[in-house]
Image: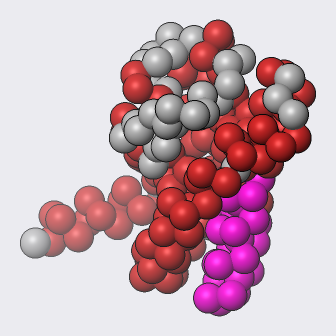
């Protein structure tokens, strides 16, 4: 019992170790979320759980570590580790139709962490999560529009609208998790 308490205290006292564990966990969670992959026949962008973990990374780890976890996820995926949707990898995948969403992950985690870092009220959490989802969706739709010559209407219908119902569910579930663990996460990662 005493040894367990000492180990816990030492690990928590090591801010670098805690940060590394937190970042690694969210890299892995985002990768696992990419394996929940539902292709839609009318759009090149699949439904995944990645954005759920992007939002949580910013809120739980804070803006700096949350965005670091998402940047590390992208770098590892670009380097050839099969972490991206459906086990894909490489720069070509990041430059593909889903690239805008993937790049939006880093900014979304940062903004969510920045907004939640204040009081952590229910309103600030919901606002942060909505902003994070909007950043991801707009980055993705903008990428489809600019890089793949989709019309604005196509980018809206294929890059944003199909994902709103799932994103609402992700925001609700993420809010519940964040409300429960925010105080402890601030203690660990701030």
Q: Is residue 145 left or right of residue 23?
A: right
Taking depth in this image into account, of 50 and 10 the one nearest to the observer is 50
Lateral position of residue 132 relative to residue 162, left or right: right
Quarter the N terminus occupies: bottom left
Could you tell me if residue 134 is visible in this image? Answer: yes
Examine the rendered structure and indicate whether residue 70 appears above or below residue 122: above
Where does the magenta region start and end?
112-136
Which one is nearer the viewer's eye here, 93 or 107?
93
Residue under the image location 72 percent in, 76 percent down: 127
Image quadrant assignment for residue 110: bottom right
Decide if residue 63 is on the left or right side of residue 153.
Answer: left
Q: Position of residue 48 (x, y in %)?
A: 47, 43
How is the rendered protein coloured? secondary structure
Name the spot of residue 64 as percent of width and height, x first: 70, 52
Per the image, is 124 magenta?
yes
Using residue 131 as the reference point, say whether residue 35 is left or right of it.
left
Q: x, y (%) of residue 69?
A: 58, 42
Q: Is residue 190 above or below residue 38?
A: below
* Depicted 163 relative to depicted 158: above or below: below
Q: Residue at x 40, y 37 (%)?
A: 37
What is the magenta segment's predominant secondary structure?
helix
Could you say which quadrant of the image residue 39 lies in?
top left
The answer to whether one can see residue 20 in this image is: no
Q: Quadrant of the C terminus?
A: bottom right
Magenta-drawn stretch contains 65: no
| Residue in view at x 65 percent, y 35 percent | 102
């Amino acid at each position: 019992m005493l040894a367990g308490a000492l180990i816990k205290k030492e690990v928590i006292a090591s801010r670098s170790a805690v940060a590394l564990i937190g970042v690694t966990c969210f890299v892995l969670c985002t990768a696992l979320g990419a394996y929940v992959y539902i292709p839609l026949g009318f759009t090149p962008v699949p439904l995944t759980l990645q954005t759920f973990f992007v939002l949580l990374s910013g809120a739980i780890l804070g803006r700096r570590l949350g965005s670091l976890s998402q940047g590390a996820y992208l770098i590892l995926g670009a380097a050839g580790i099969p972490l991206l949707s459906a086990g894909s990898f490489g720069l070509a995948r990041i430059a593909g139709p889903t690239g805008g969403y993937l790049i939006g992950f880093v900014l979304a985690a940062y903004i969510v962490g920045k907004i939640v870092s204040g009081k952590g009220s229910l309103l600030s959490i919901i606002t942060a999560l909505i902003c994070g989802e909007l950043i991801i969706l707009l980055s993705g739709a903008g990428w489809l529009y600019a890089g793949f010559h989709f019309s604005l209407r196509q980018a809206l219908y294929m890059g944003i609208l199909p994902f709103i119902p799932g994103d609402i569910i992700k925001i609700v579930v993420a809010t519940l998790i964040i409300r429960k663990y925010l105080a402890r996460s601030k203690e660990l990662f701030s």
